[in-house]
Image (cartoon, coloured by chain):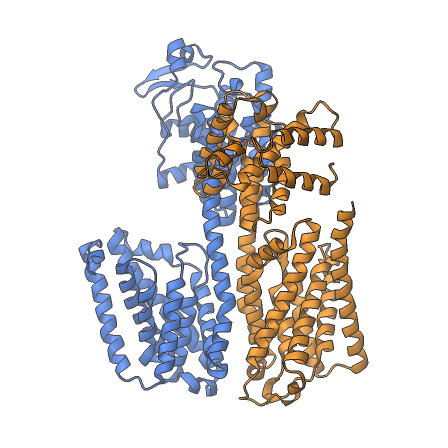
Amino acid sequence: MRKAASGALARRAVLFAGFLTGFAGFALTVRGGVPQLQVAVSFAVLVLVGELLRVNLPGDRDASPIGGAAALAYSLLVVLDNGVRAEHGVSTVVAVVFVAGVASALIHEALQRDARSTDLARRILATAAAAAAFRLVLLGSSLEHVAVGRRADQPLLAMAIAALVGIAVDFGLSAAVDATSKRAPFFPILRNEVTAQAPLALATAATGVLMALSVRVMGLWALLVFCVPLLVTQFSFRRFASISTTYRQTIRALSRVTEVGGYVEPGHARRVMTLSVAVGREFGLTDADLLDLEYAALMHDIGQLSLADPIPRGSTLTVAPSERRRIAELGAEVIRSTGTLDRVAHIVREQASPYRKMRENADADVPLAARIVKACSAYDDLVSTSREARGTRASWDALERLRMGMAFEYDPRVVEALTQVLQKNGDL
Amino acid sequence: MRSPMRELPPRARAYVLAVVAVACVLVGVAAMGYRGSLRELLAFTTLFGVASYFATETGRSISVHVGFIVALASVAVIGPRGAGVVGLACFFARVPFAKRVFNAGQLALAGLAASVAFSLVMGGDVHGRALTEAWVPQVLLAAVAASIVYYAVNLSLVAGVLTLTTGLSLRRVWAGSLSPIIVAYVGYGLLGLLMAVLYLDLGMLAALLFLAPLLVARAAFANYAQLRETYDSTVRALVHAVETKDYYTRGHSERVARVTELIAREWGMREDRVQVIRIAGMLHDVGKLGVPTKILQKQGKLSQVEFEAIKLHPLRGYEMLCEIDFLTEALSGVYHHHERLDGRGYPMGLSDADIPEFARIIMVADAFDSMTSTRSYRLAKTVDDAIAELRRCEQVQFDPKVVDCLVAAVEKHGWQPHAEPFHGEKVTKEGEAIDSPVPVISTKQGLVAVLPPEAEGERRAEGS
């Protein structure tokens, strides 16, 4: 229970810091007035539009490339068209993002869509960091002396560094929130965040820098013009996200064939999947490995389809090891025939191997994912067939049985991680 | 070096060599008069080479052609004397040798032609810095003209080689590749112009920053295309696994998917809906798994209780698939694929217009494949017999318009019925096929079951 509270805590801290920063910037700007109002309003409108055109990425990630590019461009803007110096400071940048962000959140709310206020807070903090790095630290007092004029060079290196600072803050905060809400270690989550988001983040940053650079030659038209490549990018990501979601949902749905056919207890595949992925997170697996683990856990019993009649109560625990081995082989064959899930097939094949095989034979390639699926499947079988009423008692009994098979049948580290996951979930 | 070219038919080889020779001569002659910056030429050539190297073939699927954008930018920056040279850099693409040589030649010609078109619209060789002083609408028009010419030259030359290697008629190759994509290419042309302007005003770095989101988009499109292919093979493999329960229905789902797709196209469905209904056709019987194997494989007449159990399978399928958002519209097709127009079907007993469009299509495809394949209780019918049977049952069981579409599609594409030899040892040994309640007549094709319309509905419930 305390863990659950800490999950919400990181989220609340980001929310609080974000909105405090946003409000402070807003208050300072209201007191000091907005220099070059037309520019500020144009950027605010673009941030607002960008936030409204958000794109969903696989794994419940959300991105708004256009909003991000506009916010970054305003942070890095030094020279306006015709060589006029941009007069705004960090507080104006924060205020613009804050006002546009809150407006977009209200519109999302009005349309009964998720307002994603944590993402908004993150955007405010990341933009504030980039703007502060650029305008206060990297350029500092020299900001006043940056040569302006139609053909003047712009501080490109500083712009690039500031853009990277913004990305780093964004990733760091996002991983912190994620790690606490998924109750998983921080650094693997951060690494997953980077691999999943880096291409889009870099494209966004490149466009932001480009917008800031080209306002000098194109004026505020630059804002509109450079939305085009980002819209193409966004469209491509949306297509990819929709097919990945469909793929995932289809595997989830079809993995239920074993339940519908009466081969396993209802919900078994789904429960084993949830547990396995949580245990996999404990080990800090990458997103790609977690996805393989998820598919393998969902389909680990699919080999039973080739049995003429279901095993009583579906638990492979009660059948002879050779039979268990055969079912796993058959399942792996089915999965291999998809042509693309070879790693998943390997996991499914090896989840019938006892842990002992690995110790006896150094060459035996029993992947961690297979050991996880094996232990989680056995745990779920034991809990659902337990004579005890469901609840803590049954969980303890099941774990006890796994512990007895530890080092022989099950990997001790996996059982340890499983215990931790169950404790965090409040099952023990 | 030469050997890869040998794989081409002789006429295609001559064609490729001719294109490359013409390209080399024209580009060489044009380049003689090049007076611009060598660095600029080298930079754009390198960029085009890199873009070609990293280009991935995505087949007919949607993508972003970064190379096209770079080519159009070089038309605007470098002008007709150098634009052909840039195209030659396509030689560095990661494709077989013959293809690389041909692409280098044809893209050099395309670049040359495009820059000539650009110059024609501009009323003279206006490129590079001179563009920044030109009248903007004229420059935009020139870019549009250049992209259309580039695309047209590219497409014509490729169509030529496709005709010579595949033996398809030129018209068919053109019809197959010329599509609304040209609009996208005009868009790329404008993006290329924008890249040129950025390069001229802010330098190469700005031009590269401009390409970043487009490169990311291309990678995402490539992932999308790959996963889409994977998706099909995955669904197919899992459906096969389900079908192992019943020998006679093996391959049925895949064939129903194919017939469904043919009918849906004939029906005039939008491409995205065709994909949805095709997957639905593939999955229409997935709920069969919830029916005990011994009922599914039972020979002879089903008892009331057994038939009730079978009638549950559309519901089981619906339950299983309902969380796949992509299939939302197709769920009705899975759920209602055993309804009949006269309202005597199951599970809801809907009639006529109440039966969803998707269901009306899937039920015809299902019946057509069931009849044209061998089952445990009868041999396959010929395609003509099956169509005659469908015709006989239309109005009562099937939607005549759907049957029309099926007939048209089968006429157009043909249909290879899945008529394996009668495999059921049990059947011949026990003679159950003869004892079955279905009248069987002997014809030249062998044993053919003659089913009254009512019985067909029930038998389909059992066998399909």
Q: Which chain is blue?
A: B
Q: Is residue A288 left or right of residue B379?
A: right
Against B270, is B345 above or below? above
Who is closer to the viewer here, B167 or A214?
Answer: A214
Residue at point 48% right, 26% down? A306
- The percent position of residue B136, horizontal first and vertical second, equals 49, 82
Q: Position of residue B163 (x, y in %)?
A: 27, 55
Residue B262 percent location from the top left of the image: 43, 41
Would residue B456 appear left or right of A193 to someone viewing this image? left
| Callout count | 0
Quadrant assignment for the N terminus of chain B? bottom left
Residue at 54 percent across and 47 percent down: it is: A289
Q: Left or right: A170 with respect to A427?
A: left
Q: Nearer the viewer, residue A110 or A86?
A: A86
- Res. B404 in view: yes
Q: Nearer the viewer, residue B59 or A254?
A: A254
Q: Position of residue B76 (x, y in %)?
A: 41, 79
The chain drawn in orange is A
Please, is residue A144 above or below residue A230 in the view?
below
Q: Residue at x 64, y 77 (%)?
A: A134
Asked if residue B356 shows in the view, the reply is no
Residue A216 position by quadrant: bottom right
The correct choice, above or below, for B28 with respect to B228 in the image is: below
Taking depth in this image into account, of A404 and B159 the one nearest to the observer is A404
Q: Is residue A274 left or right of residue A233?
A: right
Please name the residue shown 23% across and 56% down the image: B4
